[in-house]
Amino acid sequence: MGLRIVVVGIAGVGKSTVVEKSVSSIEGASLAVFGTAMFDAAKRLRWVKHRDEMRKLPVEKQKRLQTIAAQRISRGKGKVVFVDTHLFIRTPEGFWPGLPLAVIQALKPTHLLLIEAAPEEIVSRRENDKTRYRDKVTTEEVSAELTLARTFLSAASLVSGAPISFIQNGEGKADEAAEQIRRLVRSAEA
C-alpha cells in the first residue's frame, strides 16, 4: 500500500482546491472525494437529490453512508491516494464526526492533513460560494469550528497513529498550500 493521505478542513477553507492542485502535480497520485462517495450511495438508496441534503439526514443514515463510502475508497489502489473529506458535519442533532472509528479503520490513513485559513476568509468564501447551500455563520462560529477541527483531528491521529500536518491556505495562496503538501509527500516517499 502506498501513501493514503486524508485531507480535511472545515467548509469554506479551500480544501478541495488545494487537494486538486496537489493531486494534479504529484505523479501517481489519485483523489477520492469522500462526500461524493457518500452522495453516490445516498442517491442509489434514494435518500437525497442534492449533496447538501445529506447533512440533514438522521445520524444513523449518515453513519451508514460513511461506512459504504469508506469501504469503497479503501479498495482503491495507488502510489499516493488523497482522501478529501470533512472532520465533522453540522447536523440537526449536533456535530457528527466525519472520521469515526469505523471510517478510520477502513481508510487506514498514513497521514492526516488539516487545511486552515483565517476565520474572516472562511466566512467570505462561504458567503460567495453560490454552488453550495451554506448555512450563515459568524466569524466566532468559524473560529469555534477551527478549534473543533483540531480536536477531532488529534483524536483521529491517536486512533490511527498517523501524523498530523497543518497547511495554511490564505486568500490567493492555494498554490503555496499545495506546494507544502508536495514537499510532505516527497519527504514521506524518501
Image (tube, rainbow, N blue to C red):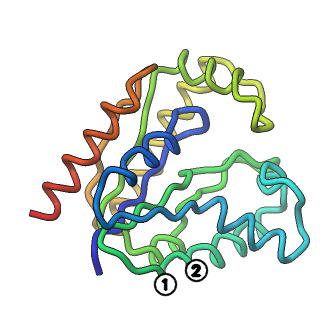
Residue 190, image x, y percentages: 8, 63
Where does the N terminus fall, quadrant-wise? bottom left
Q: Nearer the viewer, residue 163 or 45?
A: 45
Q: Is residue 142 above or below residue 5?
A: above
Q: Nearer the viewer, residue 147 or 181?
A: 181
Residue at figure coordinates x 45%, y 26% from the top left: 117
Q: Is residue 150 above or below residue 83?
A: above
Q: Is residue 129 above or below residue 140?
A: below
In the picture provided, is 32 more to the left or to the right than 27? right
Q: Is residue 77 above or below residue 177?
A: below
**SS at mark 2 in the image:** helix
Q: Amino acid at mark 2?
A: Arg
Q: Residues within 10 Å of mark 1 (few under 14, many from 20)?
A: few
Write down the residue under mark 2.
Answer: 72
Q: Residues within 10 Å of mark 2 (few under 14, many from 20)?
A: some
**SS at mark 1 in the image:** loop
Disc 1 vs disc 2: Cβ atoms closer than 8 Å? yes
Q: Amino acid at mark 1?
A: Arg
Residue 14, image x, y percentages: 52, 35
Residue at figure coordinates x 66%, y 78% from the top left: 68
Residue 79, image x, y percentages: 29, 72
> Across the whole image, how many numbered discs are drawn on residues?
2
Q: Quadrant of residue 35?
A: bottom right
Q: Nearer the viewer, residue 59 or 131?
A: 131
Write down the residue under mark 1.
Answer: 75
In the picture provided, is 22 more to the left or to the right than 107? left
In the picture provided, is 17 more to the left or to the right than 186? right
Label disc, if present, on residue 19 of the rendered structure: none
User: Spatial distance from mark 1 to mark 2, Cα to Cα?
Assistant: 6 Å
Residue 184, image x, y percentages: 21, 50
Residue at figure coordinates x 32%, y 50% from the top left: 25
Residue at figure coordinates x 74%, y 69% from the top left: 40
